[in-house]
Image (cartoon, helix red, strand yellow):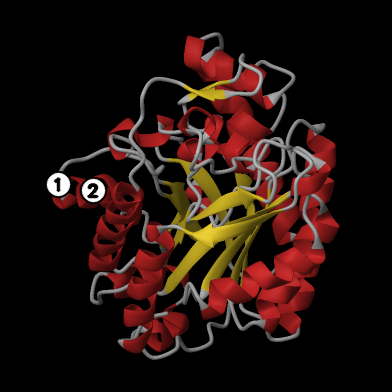
Amino acid sequence: MEKTEGISRARFLGGAVAAGAAAALGPAGDARAARGRRGLRHRGVVYTVGEGETPATAWNAHRMRTDIRAVRRDLHADTVDVTGDGVERLQATAREAAEQGLHIWLQPTPADLPQRDILDHLAETGRFAQRLRRQGASVDLSVGCEFQLFVPGIVPGDTVLDRVRALLTGAYDPVVTQRRLEAFTARAARTARSVFDGRLGYAAAEDDRVDWSLFDVVGIDYYSVHRRPADHVRALRRHLRRGKPLAVTEFGTCAYRGAPEAGGMAWDVVDLDKRPPEIKGHLVRSERTQADHLVSLLRVFESMGLYAAMAYEFVTPDAPHRADDPRHDLDLASYALTRTVQDRPGDPRSDWHWEPKQAFHALARHYAAAARGHRRPATDSRT
């Protein structure tokens, strides 16, 4: 994971049977058709590309290809959310996903760059997405993720961390912030539309106010805490009122008892002032807790017939698991479906591999069963 994605990204957070008919109806028809069917049209996982915090955890093409094949063959997902920065990394990963027959939600998320550079990055990514479409790939383009965090000039602060602190402490003007957010979102949508003619989306925080008329797909990063499935349905249903398909662009939790109740703050269990960083308190590792939470949410999304759901995330290289040292088991702060295991525990230069968590196996069973129960979605004229 990269410095402003992966585990750091989490720290700063807060195909169906009716597909053929929905394609004929267009995006609004998708939302109407969803109300008449069960199941997800696209079942996926987030895959983050980036420089990594150390050379050992940096993106590399060989590891990526192995991972994307595992997304398809072992996780049984039909969709991958390719997100992060670096146009070449995004392109290579999306190309591999297309070769594996996966539906692609391509989402560039460069952070802490001037707004003009972010838009240029989006345009270059969008042109590549358009080429993939012309070659027959199934791809949606997202203009980005939670602009308040990642785009300078909306919330005060030069870095993602500065902006998070401003949001948490209320050190910003909400009226000015909303106006800036709307202006940049509109610029991003225009930029993407100028180079890409497929489905366009955006990944917003659940309570963000977004002009969804600019997009074909409503995207929500969903970390709400509710005890009953009906409460999740109620929270999500309001996003369907816009008459557009709804994609849950992130959902998940960490692998310790009590993590789901922490919602979008489940990551906040690491004392970063310590060297090396330490887990705060006395957490009890529970991969079953994470697995059960993911499956329970998937059942909610399926009951609503949503367009897509992408579990956050496939792997977190910069949060290694330490079975022998719970105090430094940074995987407890990771939302990943896999645990990163270093060949030389505690050495940041160490090579590493991932192992599936219980959440990986639970999703794999669920995705495989769902795939057996549905035909492959018909090709959508916009995907």
Q: Around disc 2, counting alpha carbons within 10 Å, would you say few (fewer than 14), some (14 to 19), or many (20 or more)?
A: some
Q: Is residue 64 left or right of residue 360?
A: right
Mark number, residue 232: 2
Identify residue type, mark 1.
Arg
Work out how far the residue at label 1 is from the one at label 2, CA to CA, in angstroms. Answer: 7 Å
Q: Image height check: is 195 above or below 258?
A: below
Q: Which residue is mark 1?
A: 228
Q: Is residue 113 visible?
A: yes
Whether the residues at callouts 1 and 2 have beta carbons within 8 Å, the answer is yes
Q: Label 2, secondary structure: give it.
A: helix
Residue at left offset 41%, top offset 40%: 206
Foreground residue, 19 or 319?
A: 319
Q: Position of residue 233 (x, y in %)?
A: 22, 52
Mark number, residue 167: none
Residue at left offset 79%, top offset 76%: 131
Front of the two marks 1 and 2: 1
Foreground residue, 351 or 69?
A: 351
On-image quarter of the N terminus: top right
Identify residue type, mark 2.
His
